[in-house]
Image: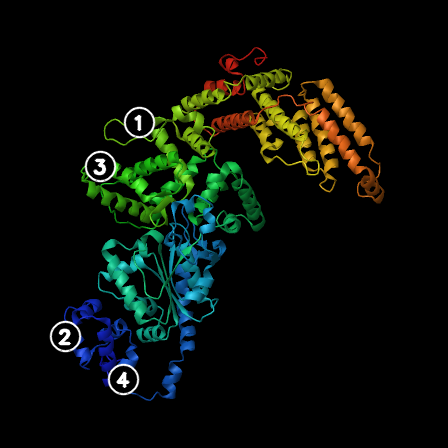
Amino acid sequence: MAKRSLQASPEGIKQAKQAFTSKGWTQADLAREVGIKTRQPIGRFFAGQPVDRQVFIELCFLLDLNWQEIADIPKVPVTSEESNDWDIDAKVEGARAPYGEKIEHQCGSLRLLDVAFPVNLDDIYVEVKILEQPVARKWLELSDWQTDWEKLLPERVAALEAVAKYGKLTVLGKPGSGKTIFLQYLACACQRGELPDSLLPIFMRLKDFGEDTSNGMSLLEYISQELEICGIGAKEVEKLLESGRMLILLDGLDEVPQKDSDAVWQEIRTFSQRYYKNKYAIATRTAACNYQLEGFAEVEIADFNQEQIEAFAKKWFVAVAKNNQQAGIAKASAFIDKLNLPENRLIRELAATPLLLHLVCLAFDSKANFPRQRSKIYREALDILLFRWDAARGIERDESYPNLSLAGKIKLLSYLAAITFERGDYVFEISIIQPYIADYLRQLPDGDTAAEALELASVAVLKSIEAQHGLLVLRSHNIYAFSHQTFQVYLTAKQIANAGLSVGAYFSNQSPAYGKYLVKYAPTYITDKPWQSVFLTVAEILPNAAPLLQMMKEQIDGLLAKDETLQQFLKWVSQKSWSFQENRQLAAVRAFYFSLAYVLDSYLALALNMGKLDVQFPPLPDFTLPLYLNFAQTLDSNLALTPNFNFAIEFDRKLRATDYTLDPALRRLCELELILSCVLNFDLALERDLALELQNSLQQLKAKLPQEAENSASFQNWWQANGQAWIEDLKALLIAHRHAGHHWQFSHQQKQLLKQYYEANQLLVDCLNSGCEVTDGARQQIEETLLLVIGNCQKISSHDQV
């Protein structure tokens, strides 16, 4: 049995005094660091007299000395029986057997939020990636984040590589990023002998240990007590620790109550220094990491990338949704397809966090689709981070500002979201938002109104929201952002809805003095891509969305009001729809003709452009027919069955399937014929006779080509001899007919206006179809007046009523 006291050897005393002098400490300093109330043991230590064993060892570690070299320990011969008894490899393997059942119980399964049964860890775990340098530790400027910020992130590496590389890790991560699951995986993998080193894993929830530290229990005693249940004695535990044969996994440092955190931190520090040969991993939230351990590397769990999201979904729909393997993978594939649609961008944003990806899978599971009101998912994700995730695990966090309730936090976050979103700030310096937080705190009952106190309190509140909920995150030194842009959009929409369709509302306990009104700025906002998500979300959460939708309709109609040519274009679109009597949904027909005319006009203008003939006909991704005809199909799904719609889709497919191996001049000719035929078919030519003449001329020019295939030797020989002359004929033909068939000849500005008008109308229809609260009468009035000349919006023409 180990002696209860130790004393330094003469040589050890000499080394200790030298180390003590180099540190520049006093004996009182040492006593305070060790945690003893008197300096007497310190004096006895330097005098070579016996002191308590634990005090002796702690003093040696503080002085950076090896206690076994300093202590005066008699050399006792070890018998062969004792030697065999302490075969350390055998001890590790021997300890694993009885302890394995407990590790499996602690770490082998998970309780997922809103799932009624535990899920096997191996059935859901996806390989974790880490950033070897936490993002928030990088010193960057705001301008760096306003460019391609993903290039600023450190390289992602497999987390197991970091475990093998560093040995001692502080694992940082946002709430729900997978810190606990990673530690549980490490424990199980170590227990099964799947890690390179043969170690005995110890998994501890620091919240539980924190409750015991107040009763004076040490980390050593806690671990010994854990293993004693499995028949592993205290002597064996200490021997394993001294030999460095344990993997110590400490989860949830951020979950320890403030009253216990200093004691827990000090105990971890002392323990990790004393038993420094072991491997360690300590998990905590990034924002709650106020301590740094000597010898520990800080790494951060990276967001899920597309590959990890897909891997998680495949496992989730088999294990959690309890589908069979084939059905689960099929459902996961449908889930990924839906998730990647443009309209689900904000949901896809949430999926980068494993906890929220679980929520997204839950939302999709029952109907194999996301809810019509996407904002339900956003609201649920917000609730999870604000309180449900902690409540489900029985965690109560200390409030740094007791006057700020949970409802107050939501109001404050909504205010900050609206202010920063209106400024176009998706990352922002603390100096931008701190005054707004201070203004809000000033309005609270019993709040301190002193400027200095408010400044300190506002920073404390910001840090608290970051640490406790992870809704605001530190991107770099003094630079913050919402953890997901989804939350910034949703909270902005919530602020607007609560403030009577206004932005930038100033908080007051009395009547709010609203600032800039959304109505005033709607012409700008409604054509702004980021704001379109806000409009859609506001429509979903308003108790009555009709006033918003009617205001949107007025602003959209006003986009083209001052341009007579564009008003004439809308009139032509309406006239074309009158002949389409078999479809009662004339707004869908108008959307079809609007899309077709707009796209074909752009294609034809480019085809007749007098640019170089030695370049390929350039693609126009912004004018693809399937993209624009989606609007018509949204209004009436039956429109997809009409001949016109199918013809248009076929035209687009053929245009993009033109053989790229053809000579550029030949390809230009083929595309010109295809475009012109489609234009004539839909009566878009201003001078139909001229357009027909161009079409005939193109056919004659094409007839001059040999009948052999383009890749044949005969054709190549002909082209080499006559190709240049043929190109000159094509060029002359284009010069002569450069305006033929080009009906509207929209300017660049008009094209941009039409594009914005189209997308704004699409947004309005998306709002109508989002499940928002709107009367049937208001819905019908909006739908029937879509894409009409302004005068006709007040009174639907008699043709439209047929």
Up/down of 395 relative to 678, above or below: below
Q: CA distance from mark 2 to mark 1?
A: 68 Å
Q: Nearer the viewer, residue 238 or 522?
A: 522
Up/down of 95 relative to 441, above or below: below
Q: Amino acid at mark 3?
A: Arg
Residue found 25% across the figure and 40% down from its top? 404
Q: Nearer the viewer, residue 237 or 695?
A: 695
- The residue where tag 4 is placed is 73
Return the mark for residue 514.
1
Q: CA distance from mark 2 to mark 3?
A: 52 Å
* For marks 3 and 1 on the same chain, the one whose residue lies earlier in the sequence: 3
- The residue where tag 3 is placed is 442
Q: CA distance from mark 4 to mark 1?
A: 78 Å
Kind of element beneath mark 1: loop
* For marks 2 and 3 on the same chain, the one whose residue lies earlier in the sequence: 2
Q: CA distance from mark 4 to mark 3?
A: 65 Å
Res. 212 visible in picture: no
Image label count? 4
> For mark 2, does the 10 Å Cα neighbourhood hold few (<14), some (14 to 19), or many (20 or more) residues?
few
* For marks 4 and 1 on the same chain, the one whose residue lies earlier in the sequence: 4
- The residue where tag 2 is placed is 40
* For marks 2 and 4 on the same chain, the one whose residue lies earlier in the sequence: 2
Kind of element beneath mark 2: helix
Q: Are marks 2 and 4 in contact (CB under 8 Å)?
A: no
